[in-house]
């Protein structure tokens, strides 16, 4: 069965001709009709331009119908291949963090963490075990994985900040900046 190509419109899903015969058949067909390929290409291009909106609408509808299937298939694959999934996630994180040459290694990050007071930089909450290392300038916005761009944040503040810039995040918060800095100073003293 591997000798036959897939043909979705066929009853059994297989092409009538084997792969080798199909190549010969198509070559004979195209050579017997000179200029056909160029005319067909021009026709397809004009049709796609003329019906671009209709094609786009149908494509989006088909994509929306299949999205649940794709999500389920991805979830099943992730459960069946936890090591591969973890490797993909770690490679992605590594690529993001390696955007700049001045990035910190894992060892440097652990040493940096030992020196830090586990107080959220944004709300001054004590986060002994439940802390997150936040990139002040997000990696997705060109920030670097370097010591001067890292800070400690509680999970709530880090989730709210997401990939916003520091200024945009602080302006959007209801907490007064002076209150936060005074609380940090009182805890540090």
Image (cartoon, grey):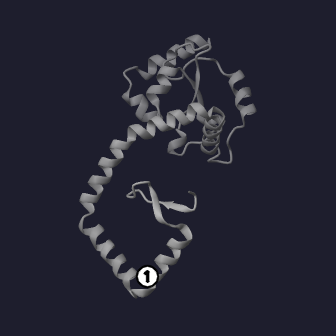
Image spot of residue 39 (x, y percent): 34, 81
Q: Nearer the viewer, residue 87 or 139?
A: 87
Q: Nearer the viewer, residue 71 or 146?
A: 71
State whether residue 6 is above or below residue 76.
below
Residue 185 visible in rendering: yes
> Which element is circle 1 on?
helix
Residue at coordinates 51% horizontally, 21% vertically from top-left? 155
The answer to which image quadrant residue 69 occupies is top left
Image spot of residue 136 (x, y percent): 54, 34
Image spot of residue 10 (x, y percent): 40, 58
Badge 1: residue crowd in 10 Å (few <14, some 14–19, many ≥20): few
State whether residue 69 is above or below residue 23.
above
Quadrant of the rendering where the C terminus is positioned:
top right
Residue at coordinates 49% horizontally, 80% vertically from top-left? 27
Q: Nearer the viewer, residue 88 or 106?
A: 88
Residue at coordinates 68% horizontally, 48% vertically from top-left? 101
The answer to which image quadrant residue 81 occupies is top right
Image spot of residue 126 (x, y percent): 56, 12
Residue 164 visible in rendering: no
The answer to which image quadrant residue 179 occupies is top left
The residue identified by callout 1 is 30
């Amino acid at each position: 069965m591997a000798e036959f190509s897939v043909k979705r419109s066929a009853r059994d899903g297989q092409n009538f001709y084997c792969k080798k015969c199909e190549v010969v058949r198509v070559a004979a067909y195209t050579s017997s009709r000179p200029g056909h390929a160029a005319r067909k290409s021009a026709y397809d291009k004009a049709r796609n331009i003329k019906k671009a909106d209709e094609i786009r609408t149908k494509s989006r509808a088909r994509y929306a119908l299949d999205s649940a299937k794709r999500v389920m298939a991805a979830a099943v694959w992730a459960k069946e291949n936890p090591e591969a999934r973890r490797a993909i996630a770690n490679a992605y994180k590594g690529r993001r963090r390696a955007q700049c040459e001045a990035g910190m290694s894992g060892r440097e990050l652990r040493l940096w963490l030992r020196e830090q007071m586990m107080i959220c930089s944004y709300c001054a909450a004590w986060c002994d075990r439940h802390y997150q290392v936040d990139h002040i300038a997000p990696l997705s916005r060109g920030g670097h994985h370097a010591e001067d761009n890292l800070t400690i944040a509680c999970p709530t503040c880090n989730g709210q900040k997401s990939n916003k810039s520091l200024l945009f995040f602080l302006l959007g918060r209801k907490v007064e900046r002076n209150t936060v800095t005074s609380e940090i100073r009182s805890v540090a003293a």
